[in-house]
């Protein structure tokens, strides 16, 4: 019923306009004289234009949206260009154009809608450019373009929506966080090392008896030729650092700072040639294995670009219910915005597994470091867990302070 009324409303206005044209013409015919005909001829162009606006199909517009770059990071400026093309150069008096976008894209912008009025005239090609000052991180959907026009009297107003879907993925901003390997323990014994054990096959330090599973290239052929017994080279046990990062996705005002810090850490670790994994704990638990390389870095950045603060429970409670799967010799870094005694007790279970454990407590710039947090830091330290407070805008000293601690 409502749809029928919406259709009948402009039709009624069209009939009323035809009636007015007929009335002015009849008045001029029967009254005669300069004034009556002047009134008719003055009204005729505006009424005819209104009729043409009513009949003009807005659906003939072809819309194209373009961005200046293919990849953006949080805080970048976005330039959007919308191009309208049409075949029929009908003189439109005005056109109100609105780019329909998810509200998230204007989270840090000075305006809340991409909307503007233009005067197309007879132009067949119309371009509109607008800027968004600071892009927020996340996936933003540009669904369609809506435009509206009308006549001089405001009798007819036409609106059309043209589908033009674009998805813009904004990656988290990256800051300089110099990475320094943490001290880990070997799988056996109490010797400490900055990294996990692996063999450096370029440096042989001795020989031993051959064991099933040894590589063919490790056989010491000179000894075999002399003694007729298979011997295998022994290599220097070299150090390599594996890191597992656990991101707490509980709702927090410092969440964006946490994502920035996590992305910066991952980039720094991978660029150092180390391997890193990520466990993202929220409404769903997403795990990435400990690996290295640019492809792995791209996968982690893609996840961090779309991640949301949707964890229904505190990190301490989640860790008690679900364990983390990782190599015991890997360092475990927890990134959170709140810390509690319960959380430290949960994290302590991982510190017992011969792993270096650090809790990075991320706070927004200007936030205070409370007495309770200082007390919890001392409590964590007594259990062999390092708790490092990191303020937004001052992440560069995070690992330096951990090494000092």
Image (tube, grey):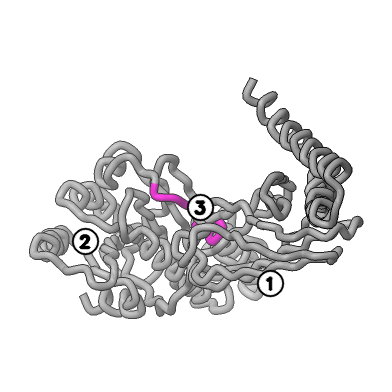
Q: Residue 385 carries which label?
A: 2
Cβ atoms under marks 2 and 3 closer than 8 Å: no
Q: Position of residue 255 (x, y in %)?
A: 36, 58
The secondary structure type at the circle numbered 1 is loop
Q: Dot 2: few (<14), some (14–19), or many (≥20) neighbours within 10 Å?
A: many
Q: Residue 223, relative to residue 4: is it above or below?
A: below
Q: Quadrant of residue 81?
A: bottom right
- Residue 302 visible in the snapshot: yes
Residue 307 is inside the magenta segment: yes
Q: Dot 1: few (<14), some (14–19), or many (≥20) neighbours within 10 Å?
A: few
Q: Residue tagged by mark 3?
A: 103
Cβ atoms under marks 3 and 1 closer than 8 Å: no
Distance Cα–Cα, label 3 vs label 1? 21 Å
In the shown orientation, is residue 397 left or right of residue 156? left
Q: Where is residue 321 in the image (x, y as percent from the top left)?
A: 30, 36
Q: Residue tagged by mark 1?
A: 68
The secondary structure type at the circle numbered 3 is helix
Residue at point 83% right, 60% down? 91
Considering the whole magenta stretch, tell me its main secondary structure. helix
Q: Position of residue 271 (x, y in %)?
A: 52, 75
Residue at point 67% right, 57% down? 97
State which tag comes first along the sequence, 3 or 1.
1
Q: Residue 278, relative to residue 312: is it above or below?
A: below
The magenta-colored residue range is 300-309
- Mark 2 against mark 1, which lies toward the viewer? 1
The residue nearer to you, when weighing 131 against 20, is 20
Residue 276 is inside the magenta segment: no
């Amino acid at each position: 019923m409502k749809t029928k009324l919406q259709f009948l409303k402009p039709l009624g206005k069209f009939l009323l306009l035809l009636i007015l044209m007929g009335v002015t013409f009849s008045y001029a015919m029967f009254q005669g004289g300069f004034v009556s005909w002047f009134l008719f001829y003055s009204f005729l162009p505006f009424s005819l234009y209104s009729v043409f606006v009513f009949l003009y199909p807005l659906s003939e517009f072809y819309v194209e949206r373009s961005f200046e770059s293919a990849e953006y990071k949080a805080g970048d400026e976005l330039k959007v260009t919308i191009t309208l093309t049409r075949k029929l150069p009908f003189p439109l008096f005005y056109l109100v154009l609105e780019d329909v976008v998810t509200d998230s894209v204007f989270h840090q912008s000075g305006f809340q809608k991409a909307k503007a009025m233009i005067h197309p005239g007879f132009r067949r090609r119309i371009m509109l450019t607008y800027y968004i000052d600071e892009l927020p991180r996340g996936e933003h959907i540009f669904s369609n373009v809506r435009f509206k026009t009308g006549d001089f009297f405001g009798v007819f107003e036409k609106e059309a929506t043209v589908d033009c879907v674009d998805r813009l993925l904004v990656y988290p901003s990256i800051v300089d966080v110099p990475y320094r390997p943490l001290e880990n323990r070997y799988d056996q014994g109490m010797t400490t090392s900055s990294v996990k054990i692996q063999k450096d096959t370029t440096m042989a330090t001795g020989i031993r008896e051959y064991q099933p599973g040894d590589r063919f290239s490790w056989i010491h052929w000179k000894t075999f030729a002399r003694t007729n017994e298979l011997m295998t080279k022994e290599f220097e046990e070299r150090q390599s650092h594996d890191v597992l990062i656990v991101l707490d996705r509980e709702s927090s005002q410092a969440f964006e700072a946490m994502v920035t810090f996590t992305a910066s850490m991952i980039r720094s670790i991978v660029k150092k040639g180390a391997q890193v994994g990520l466990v993202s704990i929220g409404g769903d638990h997403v795990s990435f294995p400990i690996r290295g390389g640019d492809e792995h870095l791209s996968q982690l950045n893609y996840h961090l670009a779309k991640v949301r603060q949707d964890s229904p429970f505190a990190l301490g409670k989640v860790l008690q219910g679900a364990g983390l799967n990782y190599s015991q010799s890997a360092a475990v870094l927890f990134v959170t915005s709140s810390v509690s005694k319960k959380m430290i007790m949960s994290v302590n279970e991982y510190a017992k597994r011969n792993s270096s454990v650090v809790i990075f407590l991320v706070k927004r710039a200007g936030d205070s470091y409370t007495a309770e947090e200082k007390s919890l830091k001392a409590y964590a330290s007594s259990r062999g867990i390092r708790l490092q407070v990191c303020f937004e805008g001052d992440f560069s000293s995070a690992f330096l302070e951990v090494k000092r601690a």
